[in-house]
Image (spheres, helix red, strand yellow):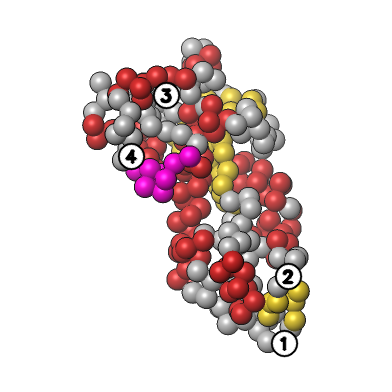
């Protein structure tokens, strides 16, 4: 039986029977490996597109005996749903690993390789080595057996859980940046290129956590340094 407290906020319109059916469908890719006694990690990322902050990745190994009802692709969940799911994922999963590739690594390696770096760090942060890795059609090249699934975050419960962890923890990091770099409104847009964010770049230039390689459409003028606490001279920006 599903206890009421195990159902995330906002899922009240689905009956326990419906939640079981949805979850069972999202285990279609895990079950063949579980039946062989293998550990399956789902891996997903968050934050490939923003102008600032790291790209985050998570690896989640679900427990076949402890169902995670209500999990879904993080993009299909409200912030309240994600917040409700995060502690349940940590409590019910066999293992959770998280990895980040920072803004300077995105600039150095490019977003594709930085994403793979974050994914490999997430796998390395697990308390054990999984036997197989399910990924959302973007293999991390981890050296482990990898199974790419198009729209995997909607088809695999493990990948969906990883998408929730990566999204929620990255957003928390960016909201914390709002206190360190108050000019940019990170607590509102979590690094994405909103109009307000771009206007802040015009006024204050980039911070130490901005991805310079993502700001190439900005015309720079080095008429004064930024006042955001970044190291060294921070040029002013003009869109």
Tell which tag, 3 or 4, sits nearer the viewer.
4
Q: CA distance from mark 2 to mark 3?
A: 45 Å
Residue marked by disc 3 = 23
Magenta segment, principal secondary structure? helix
- Near mark 4 (Cα within 10 A), the count class, few <14, some 14-19 or many ≥20, is few
Q: In 3D space, how far apart are the residues under numbered discs 2 and 1 (Cα atoms)?
A: 15 Å
**Was residue 198 drawn as part of the magenta stretch in this picture?**
no
Residue where numbered disc 2 is placed: 218
Q: On the picture, is 1 further left or further right than 44?
A: left
Disc sitting over residue 223 in the figure = 1
Label 2 vs label 4: CA separation? Answer: 41 Å
Which of disc 1 and disc 2 is earlier in sequence? 2
Mark 1 or mark 3: name the one nearer the start of the chain.
Answer: 3
Q: Which residue is mark 4?
A: 10
Instruction: Give the magenta-colored segment's residue range.
Output: 76-84
Q: CA distance from mark 4 to mark 1?
A: 50 Å
What x and y, as percent, mark residue 162?
50, 38
Examine the rendered structure and indicate whether residue 177 appears above or below residue 109. below
Residue at position x 23%, y 31% in the image: 4
- Assign a secondary structure to mark 1: loop
Q: Is residue 38 above or below residue 199?
A: above
Tell me the residue at 45%/56% (across/down): 172
């Amino acid at each position: 039986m599903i206890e009421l407290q195990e159902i995330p906020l906002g899922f009240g319109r689905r009956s326990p029977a419906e939640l079981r059916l949805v979850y069972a469908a999202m285990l279609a890719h895990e079950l063949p490996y579980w039946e062989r006694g293998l550990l399956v990690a789902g891996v997903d990322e968050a934050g490939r597109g923003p102008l600032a902050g790291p790209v985050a990745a998570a690896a989640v190994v679900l427990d076949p005996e402890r169902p995670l009802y209500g999990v879904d692709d993080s993009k299909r969940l409200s912030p309240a749903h994600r917040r409700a799911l995060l502690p349940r994922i940590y409590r019910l999963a066999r293992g959770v690993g998280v990895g980040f590739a920072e803004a300077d690594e995105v600039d150095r390696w490019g977003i594709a390789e930085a994403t793979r770096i974050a994914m490999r760090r997430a796998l390395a942060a697990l308390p054990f080595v999984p036997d197989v890795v399910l990924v959302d059609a973007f293999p991390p090249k981890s050296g482990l057996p990898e199974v790419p699934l198009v729209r995997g975050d909607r088809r695999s419960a493990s990948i969906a859980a990883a998408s929730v962890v990566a999204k929620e923890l990255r957003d928390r990091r960016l909201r914390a940046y709002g206190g360190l770099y108050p000019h940019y409104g990170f607590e509102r847009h979590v690094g994405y290129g909103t109009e307000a964010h771009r206007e802040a770049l015009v006024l204050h230039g980039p911070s130490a956590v901005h991805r310079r390689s993502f700001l190439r459409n900005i015309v720079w003028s080095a008429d004064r340094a930024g006042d955001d606490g970044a190291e060294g001279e921070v040029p002013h920006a003009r869109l």
